[in-house]
């Protein structure tokens, strides 16, 4: 018997679902399409802050009990980033929207200041928001790997809804690209496409993933140029992941080096050919 996809059963949604169901974010989201005064939205925001504070204390205890502090930090930040996107959708003056967002951010900062020995950071610049969304997405992919494998199309529809409010204010003119590169991962993609498309990565340990591993740019060429063949391990292993575009760039880089070496004088070409053979062997072993 085929079981229908149910996003409520996703492992990654456990804490975010609690925040969604126990705060008045649903009411806030429904009101964004209505004509509302600043004072009316402010009332909603005050109610949301109050309900969030209560829910936060419950979640915080569970997070520490099960040593899920970092996951909770990611999910709390995601929840507030959603709220921020909803506020931006209201038909209010920009100064009014910014004031409402500040009230939400200030309330959260008071809570996070007492988060404990594990620091829960919340940077507010655009690239930091994008990076924390990317990091959350990667962790969610690993948690949801079994469902992604069986329900990839349904999961993709869920992802569009999951990131819609945040993408609206972080994607610019749909020309934002990302590169994730370290010893165990290589991903090159459009920011929006990455967030809205399921990725099956079953064996990657993300504990060592850092913000510094993620580069964001509107210039795809600069990201491609910055990819270095020297950083790749010589042997493939189950704990590594590279997406198709990243692998294609690697192959193209090797081909370009090979073409340039053919044009070099004979004495240099011998060493060049040796280098190319080594690189080709290295890349093929990793991706085959």
Image (cartoon, grey):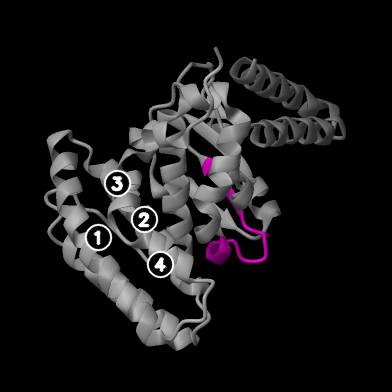
| Dot 3 and dot 2 residues touching (CB under 8 Å) | no
Residue 179 percent location from the top left of the image: 57, 46
The residue pinned by badge 1 equals 52
Q: Which residues are magenta?
A: 168-180
Residue named by callout 4: 28
Confirm whether the magenta stretch covers residue 263: no
Quick one: SS at disc 3? helix
Query: Magenta segment: does it hold 169?
Result: yes
Q: CA distance from mark 3 to mark 2?
A: 10 Å
Q: Spot the residue most to the top.
A: 1
Q: Is residue 50 left or right of residue 232?
A: left
Q: What is the x, y in percent for residue 264?
A: 84, 34
Mark 3 vs 2, N-terminal side: 3
Task: First in sequence, mark 2 or 4: give its number.
Answer: 4
Marks 1/2 in contact by CB < 8 Å: the verdict is yes
* Badge 3 vs badge 1, beta-carbon distance below 8 Å: no
Q: Which residue is mark 3?
A: 18
Q: Nearer the viewer, residue 32 or 161?
A: 32
């Amino acid at each position: 018997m085929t079981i229908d996809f149910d996003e409520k059963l996703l492992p990654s949604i456990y804490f975010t679902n609690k925040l969604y169901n126990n705060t008045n974010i649903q009411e806030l989201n429904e009101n964004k399409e209505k004509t509302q005064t600043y004072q009316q939205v402010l009332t909603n925001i005050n109610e949301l802050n109050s309900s969030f504070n209560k829910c936060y204390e419950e979640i915080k205890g569970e997070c520490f009990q099960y040593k899920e502090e970092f996951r909770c930090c990611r999910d709390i930040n995601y929840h507030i980033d959603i709220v921020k996107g909803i506020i931006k959708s209201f038909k209010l003056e920009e100064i009014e929207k910014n004031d409402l967002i500040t009230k939400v951010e200030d309330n959260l900062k008071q809570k996070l200041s007492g988060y404990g020995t594990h620091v829960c950071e919340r940077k507010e610049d655009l690239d930091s928001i994008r990076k924390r969304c990317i990091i959350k997405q990667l962790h969610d992919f690993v948690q949801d790997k079994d469902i992604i494998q069986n329900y990839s199309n349904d999961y993709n529809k869920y992802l569009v809804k999951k990131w819609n409010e945040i993408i609206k204010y972080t994607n610019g003119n749909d020309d934002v690209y990302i590169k994730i590169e370290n010893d165990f991962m290589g991903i090159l993609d459009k920011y929006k496409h990455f967030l809205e498309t399921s990725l099956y990565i079953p064996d990657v340990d993300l504990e060592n993933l850092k913000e510094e591993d993620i580069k964001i740019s509107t210039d795809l060429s600069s990201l491609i140029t910055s990819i270095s063949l020297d950083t790749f391990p010589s042997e493939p292993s189950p704990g590594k992941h590279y997406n198709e575009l990243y692998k294609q760039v690697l192959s193209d880089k090797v081909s370009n080096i090979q073409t340039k070496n053919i044009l070099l004088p004979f004495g240099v070409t011998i060493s060049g050919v040796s280098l190319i053979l080594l690189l080709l062997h290295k890349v093929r072993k990793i991706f085959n």
